[in-house]
Amino acid sequence: MNQELIAVIAQMEREKGIKAQKIISAVESALLSAARKKYDGADNIQVTLDPVTGEIEAVVLKKIVEDVRNAQSEISLEDAKKMDGSAE
């Protein structure tokens, strides 16, 4: 699927004359919008599409805290360390 997406983007660039980066930005924006809709308007989400591999990465940025009061924007140190041992 990922390489197919890159192939479609390249084809659109050739046929429609739209720069690949502009198409990639539009895809990223659409994915970001969908993610925000699914997660109640969260504004701490980032989406990137690698133009070479077609890999899509969606990341939720959270603040590490001792006492989690908002699970949408905060994470405990214990849970953060489970994801990344170097978390502080």
Image (tube, rainbow, N blue to C red):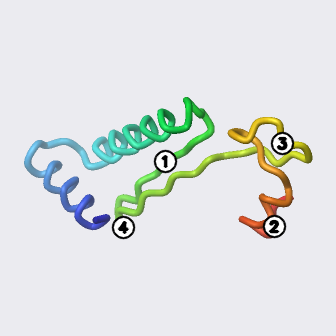
How many angstroms separate mark 3 from mark 2 (CA)? 19 Å
Instruction: Specify few, some or many for label 3: CA neighbours under 10 Å numbering under 14, 14-19, or 20 or more.
Output: some
Q: Secondary structure at mark 4?
A: loop
Q: Quadrant of residue 3?
A: bottom left
**Residue that label 3 marks:** 68
Q: Secondary structure at mark 1?
A: strand
Going by the image, does 84 lie left or right of 11? right
**Residue that label 1 marks:** 47
Q: Earlier in the sequence, mark 4 or mark 2?
A: 4
Q: Are marks 4 and 2 in contact (CB under 8 Å)?
A: no
Residue 35, x across and y down, in percent: 48, 41
Q: Amino acid at mark 2?
A: Ser
Q: Are marks 1 and 3 in contact (CB under 8 Å)?
A: no
> What residue is shown at x 51% (from left), y 35% (from top)?
36
Q: Are marks 1 and 2 in contact (CB under 8 Å)?
A: no
How many angstroms separate mark 1 from mark 2 (CA)? 23 Å
Q: Earlier in the sequence, mark 1 or mark 4?
A: 1
In the displayed orientation, state which residue is furthest to the right.
66
Q: Secondary structure at mark 3?
A: loop
Instruction: Specify few, some or many for label 2: CA neighbours under 10 Å numbering under 14, 14-19, or 20 or more.
Output: few
**Residue that label 2 marks:** 86
> What residue is shown at x 54% (from left), y 45% (from top)?
46
Q: Secondary structure at mark 2?
A: loop
Which quadrant, please, contains the N terminus? bottom left
Instruction: Specify few, some or many for label 1: CA neighbours under 10 Å numbering under 14, 14-19, or 20 or more.
Output: some
